Image: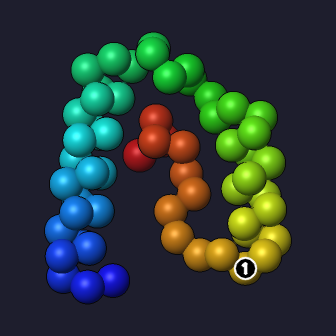
Amino acid sequence: MTGDEQDLAEVQRAHWQSTYSAHPGMYGEEPSAPAVHAATVFRTAGARGPTAHPHRR
């Protein structure tokens, strides 16, 4: 990632952390079945990066 992309990623992460904190029940307590499936597919394909549900810091 370039410096600008990293900065944008940090701003987006801060935004969503704030959103989740302000509305903890809005997005559910557990990841959805499609999200779990997608994470499994990406992991199996060797993708790396954050895959944890945002509620699990």
Q: How crowded is mark 1: few (under 14 residues within 10 Å), some or many (20 or more)?
A: few
Identify which residue is drawn at 41% across, 46% down.
57
Picture coordinates of residue 56, whole percent (x, y): 48, 41
Position above or below: 8 against 21: below
Name of the residue lying farthest toward the bottom? 2
Counting from the top left corner in percent of width and height, residue 42 is at: 72, 66
Instruction: Look at the picture and state if 27 lies above or below 51.
Output: above
Horizontal relation, residue 54 to residue 44: left or right:
left
Q: Quadrant of the N terminus?
A: bottom left
For label 1, the residue is 46
Q: Which of 5 and 31 is in front in this view?
A: 5
In the picture, residue 5 is in which quadrant?
Answer: bottom left
Residue 28 lies, in percent from the top left, at 55, 20
The image shows residue 12, relative to residue 48, as above or below, that is above
Q: Which residue is drawn at 22% across and 47% down?
A: 14
Residue at image location 45% in from the left, 16% down from the top: 26
**Residue 53 located left or right of residue 12:** right
Q: Residue 53 at x, y = what percent?
A: 54, 43
Kind of residue sitting beneath label 1: Gly
Residue drawn at (18%, 68%), measured in percent from left and top?
7
Instruction: For mark 1, give the secondary structure.
Output: loop
